[in-house]
Amino acid sequence: MRIVKISTAVMEANFDWTLIKVETDEKITGYGEAFMAPGLTAVIREFSGLLAGEDPTSIDRVLRRMRSAVTHASAGVAWHAIGGIETALLDAIGKRHGMPVWQLLGGKYRDSVTVYADCHAGEALSSITPLLVPRTPGWMAGEGPGSAGGSGAVSLKHHGWDKAEGGHLSADQFAAQAQHMAAQGFRILKFDVDVPTPYETDEYNRDLSPGEVDYAAGLVRAVRAAVGGGVGLAIDCHWNYGVDAAIRLARALEPFRLLWLEDPVPPANVRAIGEVQRATSAVIATGENHYERVDFERLMTEAGLRVLAPDVQKLGLWEGRKLADLADMHYVNLTWHNISSPIGTMAGVHLGASTPNLLAIEWHAASVPFFDSLVKGATEPLIRNGRVRVPDAPGLGVELDEDAAYRYRKSGEPFFE
């Protein structure tokens, strides 16, 4: 089998969902998804020329060739492209040999994978560009290529949290969203606490006033009271705080028995992350902005982290499976970060099934009304009662409905050419 063509399509959801299609000389097609980034599709097109004629079944060699080709550049966008292409290659390989991707990864540990619901800040997430600028998708606004398919689209908000009623979010909003998602069967929920507060904030000094810490703790207290002790709870901080503020926040949240406190400090400084972890009994997690096993090895051995949160699309399935073994050697658990469409989410399900030390994978798209319509021939939601069944069908086990995806395509981007 030889690679003939690699093409892309981008949809405007809460984020850009960049889908990749690999076509082969045996008429086998594989789909993958890449984590959003400015200029991403141009990078993928460069790789298309590099990989033409390659045998995708030599997956490790093909991945090394792509990574070697971009060693002169920073990881970032190139790694995003590689991760998405890799998934499409594995999908094609599985289809050729009649094997599900989890089998290519070495087998499965479970027949269904736990999914945690990212509840954001008690409201639907904004639709944002790859530079995190709020936008109104063309299909929602009644303009642009996707407008004809906007049925039900009004349920996806397109403005930021700073426009919430009263200027800040209430504990009641957090509690109501927690109850809503728990009622749908999710047994793990994640909320953001880096949200507008009633207090004046300096957005540059990474500090938290006592009032801000108390406000964040009050939001988490309301969620815990709403769902009780039987629902796991994680909290995201999006790298916004300094070491001292992060420690004070972590200690304030200790009574609520978090599964993890995610990204309280910026990701680059391993020493700083370790200082926060050693100062609190709360479990600190990070990893969605790290790309290689050596990065995660430092987080475990130098920072002492007990939970890692790599991103499925950034790290890729092949590297992710290798990381799982490395983390298992240190008795560290993984929770897979995932903000993707059903294609990327199902890739995460296969990786999660083959990961022995899995806690859960993320679902970030509860506010996207067309999520399930992207799965060709689907008769039921992909996620049911907070879990996804691990498929036995070849490849990813799901096919993209290109007609449905086309209705939500991003203006100015090719749609699989």
Image: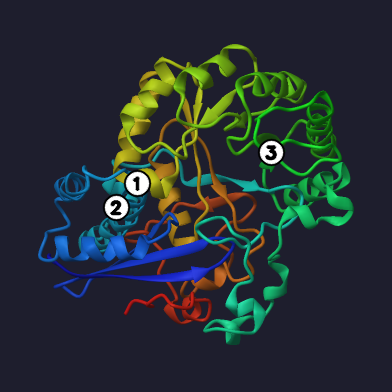
Measure the C-alpha gap from mark 1 to mark 2: 8 Å
Q: Quadrant of the C terminus?
A: bottom left
Q: Residues within 10 Å of mark 2 (few under 14, many from 20)?
A: many
Dots 1, 2 in contact, CB < 8 A? yes
**Residue at which label 3 appears:** 203
Measure the C-alpha gap from mark 3 to mark 2: 34 Å
Vertical arrangement, residue 74 with respect to residue 12, above or below: above
Give the mark nearest the N terminus, 1 or 2.
2
Measure the C-alpha gap from mark 3 to mark 1: 33 Å
Instruction: Provide residue 102's location: percent of width, then percent of height.
Output: 34, 48
Q: Quadrant of residue 208?
A: top right
- Circle nearer the viewer, 3 or 1: 3
Instruction: Provide residue 323's location: percent of width, then percent of height.
Output: 34, 32
Q: Residues within 10 Å of mark 3 (few under 14, many from 20)?
A: few
Say what amino acid the circle numbered 1 marks: Gly
Vertical arrangement, residue 352 with respect to residue 12, above or below: above
- Secondary structure beneath label 1: loop
Say what amino acid the circle numbered 2 marks: Ile
Dots 3, 2 in contact, CB < 8 A? no
**Residue at which label 1 appears:** 316
Tag shown at residue 414 = none
- Circle nearer the viewer, 3 or 2: 3
Q: Residue at x 27, y 55 (%)?
A: 90
Q: Residues within 10 Å of mark 1 (few under 14, many from 20)?
A: many
Q: Residue at x 57, y 17 (%)?
A: 277
Say what amino acid the circle numbered 3 marks: Glu
Q: Quadrant of residue 154?
A: bottom right
- Secondary structure beneath label 2: helix
**Residue at which label 2 appears:** 82
- Secondary structure beneath label 3: loop
Give the mark nearest the N terminus, 3 or 1.
3
